[in-house]
Amino acid sequence: HVQPGAEFQSRTGRLYTIGEVTARRFEVIRDGGKPCLVSWKLVNSTLDRLQSGEVLTYQANGSQGGISYTVAVEAGVLFALKDLAICDNTTRTISLKKE
C-alpha cells in the first residue's frame, strides 16, 4: 500500500508524500521538498523486531532500540507498517498492534 503520491503525517504532525517506489526502496518527500530514502530491508527488519516482541523507541537508531534517528525515515517505515504497528505518545514507543 506504499504508492507514489500517497500523503501521510508523522507522529509529530508533519506532512510527507511518497515519491518513487522501487523493489529496493521508496522515497519519503518532506514538505520542504527534500527526499529521504527508506529501504524495504529496514521495513522488513523493523517488522521482524516488532513480531519478536521488541518495543521500539521513538527517534533512535536501531542500535539504540529504535528505527532511525531521522524522523522522515521513521515515519516512512511506520507508514509502510501502518496496519501492523502502533505508536504510544505517552511512553514514546512503537509496538506491534494487538489482534
Image: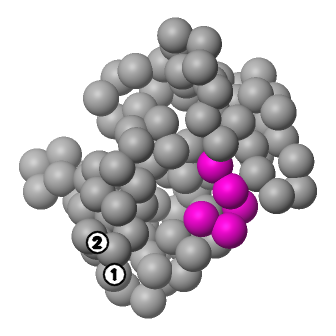
**Horizontal side, residue 43 vs residue 97: left or right:** right
Residue 10 appears at what percent x and percent y? Answer: 41, 32
Q: Earlier in the sequence, mark 2 or mark 1?
A: 1
Mark 2 burial class by Cα count in 10 Å: few <14, some 14-19, many 20+:
some
Residue 86 appears at what percent x and percent y? Answer: 38, 56
**Residue 96 in sight from this viewpoint:** yes
For the record, the magenta segment spans 38-42
**The image quarter in which residue 53 lies:** bottom left
Amino acid type of the residue that numbered disc 2 sits on in the rendered structure: Gly
**Residue 95 in sight from this viewpoint:** no
**The image quarter in which residue 93 lies:** bottom left
User: Residue 79 bears which disc, if any?
Assistant: none
- In this view, the residue farthest toward the left is 90
Q: Which residue is mark 1?
A: 54
- Whether residue 8 appears in magenta in the rendering, the answer is no
Vertical relation: 16 (above or below) 28: above
Disc 1, SS: loop
Residue 67 appears at what percent x and percent y? Answer: 41, 61
Calculate the distance from the C-alpha at mark 2 to the C-alpha at mark 1. Answer: 9 Å
**Horizontal side, residue 83 vs residue 4: left or right:** left
Q: Which residue is mark 2?
A: 65
Mark 2–mark 1 CB contact (< 8 Å):
yes
Vertical relation: 19 (above or below) 32: below
Query: Which residue is located at x 46 percent, y 27 percent?
Result: 9
Vertical relation: 62 (above or below) 14: below
Nearer-the-camera pick, 56 or 35? 35
Q: Main secondary structure of the magenta part?
A: helix
Query: Which residue is located at x 54 percent, y 81 percent?
Result: 48
**The image quarter in which residue 35 lies:** top right
Residue 61 appears at what percent x and percent y? Answer: 35, 62
Amino acid type of the residue that numbered disc 1 sits on in the rendered structure: Glu
